[in-house]
């Protein structure tokens, strides 16, 4: 039974690290632009990802397996898509209220469930599909402020960018799960950390080409902002490690749906610090998220 739910703590740890990483990236994007804010999770995350793999190998003594061509292909596709998804996320967050942007992007679990079924045959139980839909509705409700109505979601350009970002993040999760599964040798931890380093290496190479061809200032400016860039990279590597390990243990749709439990936790802490309590709409959204996650756990059992 413990092994059945081993993906849960890794998912929760990844979600927590991601909250803080997004905060650092958002601040960086405001200072050094979208490209600069996008690249830190990859370029600055690679050394930390490599350190995690080296630490695991040093402690366990396990041999590093060979990465087959199929795994490289999935990792490359996932890496490129994640760069695009991150850039679009920062764009929509800069243009729209954070809550509305979050509602757009966090339609991701639906995309993950559909693409997981189509691309790699990950079949959710009917109860799991119900959980995904309940959580998604809860996110939309909880993300909107009291003065936001349906019109707040009606900006079609931001809606298109945000939903596309969420869809690309969903496809990224499927690619990385497929890449980990394509490595035929090693424990789930070894395969997950190995693909993490491989994908970060590919993403760093892609961003290096971008710097040379288009925008070298994005990297040089991030060096000047190293106090934000380094922790963003470290948190990005930790979050990705958690995601990858969870992907190796269960379907990506389960992981990305459970990850949304971060939202009510972060909001409750934020409201407590600001002194403003939750609105009825936020309460309704958070209750739906909690119900959806609970149903997901039941479906997984």
Image (cartoon, grey):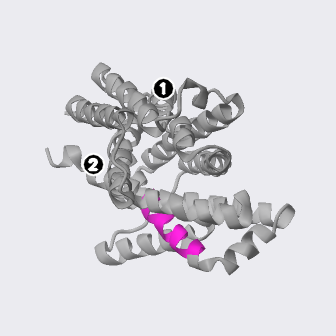
Q: Return the residue nearer the eye: 266 or 41.
A: 266
- Crowding near pointer 1: few (<14 within 10 Å), some, many (20+)? some
- Crowding near pointer 2: few (<14 within 10 Å), some, many (20+)? many
Percent position of residue 106, x then y: 49, 38
Quarter of the picture holding the C terminus: top left
Question: Which residue is identified by label 1?
Answer: 114
Instruction: Name the residue at 33% across, 44% down.
Output: 261
Q: Is residue 236 magenta?
A: yes
Q: Quadrant of residue 45?
A: bottom right
Percent position of residue 282, x then y: 37, 37
Please indicate whether residue 295 sits to the left or right of residue 92 in the image.
left
**In the rendered image, is residue 179 in sight?**
yes
Q: Return the residue nearer the eye: 243 or 217.
A: 217
- Label located before the other in sequence (2 or 1): 2
Secondary element under disc 2, as helix, strand or loop, is helix
Please indicate whether residue 87 sits to the left or right of residue 149 in the image.
right
Please indicate whether residue 100 sits to the left or right of residue 37 in the image.
left
Q: Is residue 298 magenta?
A: no
Percent position of residue 177, x then y: 45, 44
Instruction: Name the residue at 53% across, 68% down.
Output: 232
Residue stretch in magenta: 228-240
Q: Main secondary structure of the magenta part?
A: helix
Instruction: Name the residue at 24% across, 30% down.
Output: 295
Q: Is residue 14 above or below residue 153?
A: below
Please indicate whether residue 296 sits to the left or right of residue 179 in the image.
left
Quarter of the picture holding the N terminus: top left
Q: Return the residue nearer the eye: 257 or 33.
A: 33
Question: Which residue is identified by label 2?
Answer: 8
């Amino acid at each position: 039974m413990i092994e059945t739910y081993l993906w849960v703590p890794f998912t929760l740890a990844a979600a927590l690290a991601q909250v803080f990483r997004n905060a650092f990236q958002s601040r960086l994007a405001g200072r050094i632009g979208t490209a600069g804010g996008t690249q830190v999770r990859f370029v600055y995350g690679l050394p930390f990802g490599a350190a995690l793999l080296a630490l695991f190998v040093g402690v366990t003594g396990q041999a590093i397996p060979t990465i087959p061509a199929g795994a490289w292909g999935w990792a490359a596709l996932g890496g490129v898509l994640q760069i695009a998804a991150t850039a679009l996320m920062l764009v929509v967050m800069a243009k729209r209220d954070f809550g509305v942007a979050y509602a757009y992007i966090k339609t991701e679990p639906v995309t993950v469930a559909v693409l997981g079924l189509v691309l790699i045959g990950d079949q959710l139980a009917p109860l799991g599909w119900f959980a995904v839909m309940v959580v998604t509705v809860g996110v939309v409700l909880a993300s909107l402020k009291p003065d936001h109505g349906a019109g707040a979601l009606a900006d079609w350009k931001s809606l298109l960018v945000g939903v596309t970002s969420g869809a690309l993040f969903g496809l990224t999760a499927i690619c990385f799960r497929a890449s980990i599964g394509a490595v035929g040798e090693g424990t789930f931890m070894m395969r997950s950390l190995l693909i993490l380093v491989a994908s970060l290496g590919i993403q760093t190479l892609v961003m290096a080409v971008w710097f040379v061809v288009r925008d070298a200032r994005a990297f040089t400016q991030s060096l000047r902002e190293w106090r934000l860039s380094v922790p963003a990279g470290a948190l990005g590597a930790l979050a990705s490690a958690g995601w990858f390990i969870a992907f190796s243990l269960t379907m990506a749709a389960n992981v990305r749906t459970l990850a949304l439990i971060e939202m009510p936790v972060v909001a409750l802490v934020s409201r407590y610090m600001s002194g403003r309590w939750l609105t009825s709409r936020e309460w309704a959204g958070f209750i739906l998220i909690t119900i959806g996650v609970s149903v997901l756990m039941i479906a997984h059992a």
